[in-house]
């Protein structure tokens, strides 16, 4: 018996996974996750790559702990529980060190960080720039030129890479330049650390797209003055004590009540905790897409100016989000490091 649901949002690259209390990390790790695409009039009208498997490719990035026999059983140790699981093998669409033949011209990659705990910093080994055209909730207003892309667990991004200046037969690598445990406050992105994830082999075929639109869509900014309430959410703790607003998840408790149709500002902070000053946490909201107002009072980077449902909060940082709640029901908000979610770094809100 299938499940029916109503799609009520713009074109986007989305994903799904189970959400069983205390078992999410294990079930996602063992493969219960996948992508689905939403298309609409805007995506149909744009002159961008959209031929699946020809010039439009999904890239689901996951890491796994693999032993010498190729065994990837989910057996988290204490560090995994504290930091989120970090693997020694990287899978792209389920394959280790794959290669992909790509045409010359612009190629679209829909990237999902489907890892349990690892944050990535993606770039190309030839230092080539690319354009981000979409984030979690769909298209950005305009393509954003970038040389590196950071994605924490559950974040998505669509990028366009121009292979028109690359000779047929040449190879370009997608690399990760984030150090291990970059989520820790005591470490930072280290561009000297380079892990090869996959290889693009350029062919003599043509993608059919040699320029990109200057405008992708129109995003109406939600004005802070339209918010009827500001709520505070403090993420804190390490190891077995992981909380939001000092509380661990309780299925029998509703933590926040929101009035249907209203707009609110959620101030999410990440407290400095532990000997190392804490670690970054990706904050995820169910049932709604939000806009980022600011990070520590500063405007968000351009590629965070669209609709999102997951945002990485650094230790000591305050990020203000604004959302309009147009879906009734009970929804969750949580850290999307899955081991942290399972440990109780999660709450529930009801829209009624």
Image: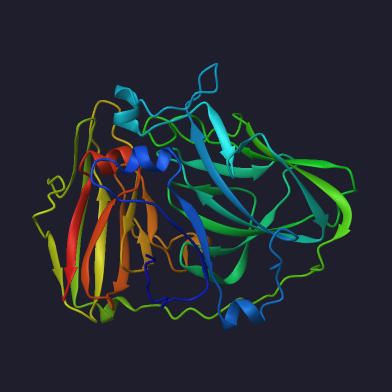
Q: Position of residue 230 (x, y in %)?
A: 19, 68
User: Residue drawn at (89%, 43%), measured in percent from left and top?
Assistant: 169
Q: Position of residue 350 (x, y in %)?
A: 17, 68
Horizontal side of 227 relative to 102 (left or right) equals: left
Q: Is residue 334 above or below residue 181?
A: below
Quarter-of-image position of residue 79: top left
User: Residue drawn at (27%, 76%), measured in percent from left and top?
Assistant: 327
Horizontal side of 8 relative to 328 (left or right) equals: right
Q: Position of residue 313 (x, y in %)?
A: 35, 49
Closest to the observer, 179 or 113: 113
The total number of labels drawn is: 0
Horizontal side of 82 relative to 255 (left or right) equals: right
Quarter-of-image position of residue 272: top left
Identity of the residue furthest to the front in this view = 1
Closest to the observer, 2 or 151: 2
Horizontal side of 53 relative to 296 (left or right) equals: right
Quarter-of-image position of residue 5: bottom left
User: Residue drawn at (9%, 56%), measured in percent from left and top?
Assistant: 253
Q: Position of residue 349 (x, y in %)?
A: 18, 63
**In which quadrant will I find the C terminus?**
bottom left
Scheme of image coloration: rainbow
């Amino acid at each position: 018996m299938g499940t029916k649901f109503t799609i009520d949002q713009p074109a986007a690259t989305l994903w799904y996974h189970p959400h069983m209390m205390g078992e999410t990390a294990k079930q996602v790790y063992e493969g219960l996750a996948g992508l689905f695409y939403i298309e609409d009039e805007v995506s149909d009208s744009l002159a961008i790559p959209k031929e699946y498997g020809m010039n439009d490719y999904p890239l689901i990035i996951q890491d796994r702990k693999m032993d010498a026999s190729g065994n990837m059983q989910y057996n988290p140790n204490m560090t995994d529980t504290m930091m989120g699981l970090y693997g020694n093998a990287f899978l792209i669409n389920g394959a280790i060190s794959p290669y992909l033949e790509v045409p010359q011209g612009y190629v679209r990659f829909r990237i999902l960080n489907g890892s349990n705990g690892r944050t990535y910093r993606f770039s190309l080994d030839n230092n080539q720039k690319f354009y981000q055209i979409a984030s979690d909730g769909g298209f950005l207003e305009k393509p954003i030129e970038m040389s590196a892309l950071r994605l924490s667990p559950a974040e998505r991004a669509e990028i366009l890479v121009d292979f028109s200046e690359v000779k047929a037969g040449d190879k370009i690598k997608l690399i990760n330049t984030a150090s291990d445990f970059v989520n820790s406050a005591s470490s930072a992105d280290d561009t000297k650390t380079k892990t090869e994830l996959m290889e693009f082999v350029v062919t003599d075929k043509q993608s059919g797209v040699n320029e990109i639109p200057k405008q992708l869509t129109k995003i109406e900014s939600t004005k802070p003055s339209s918010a009827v309430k500001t709520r505070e959410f403090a993420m804190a703790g390490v190891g077995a004590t992981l909380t939001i607003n000092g509380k661990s998840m309780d299925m029998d408790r509703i933590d926040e009540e929101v009035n249907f149709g209203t707009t609110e500002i959620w101030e999410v902070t990440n407290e400095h905790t532990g000997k190392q000053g804490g670690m970054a946490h990706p904050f995820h909201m169910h049932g709604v897409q939000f806009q980022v107002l600011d990070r520590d009072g500063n405007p968000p980077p351009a590629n965070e100016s669209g609709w999102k449902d997951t945002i990485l909060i650094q230790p000591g940082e305050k990020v203000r989000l604004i959302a309009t709640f147009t879906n009734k029901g009970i929804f969750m908000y949580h850290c999307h490091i899955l081991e942290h979610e399972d440990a109780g770094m999660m709450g529930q809100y009801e829209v009624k």
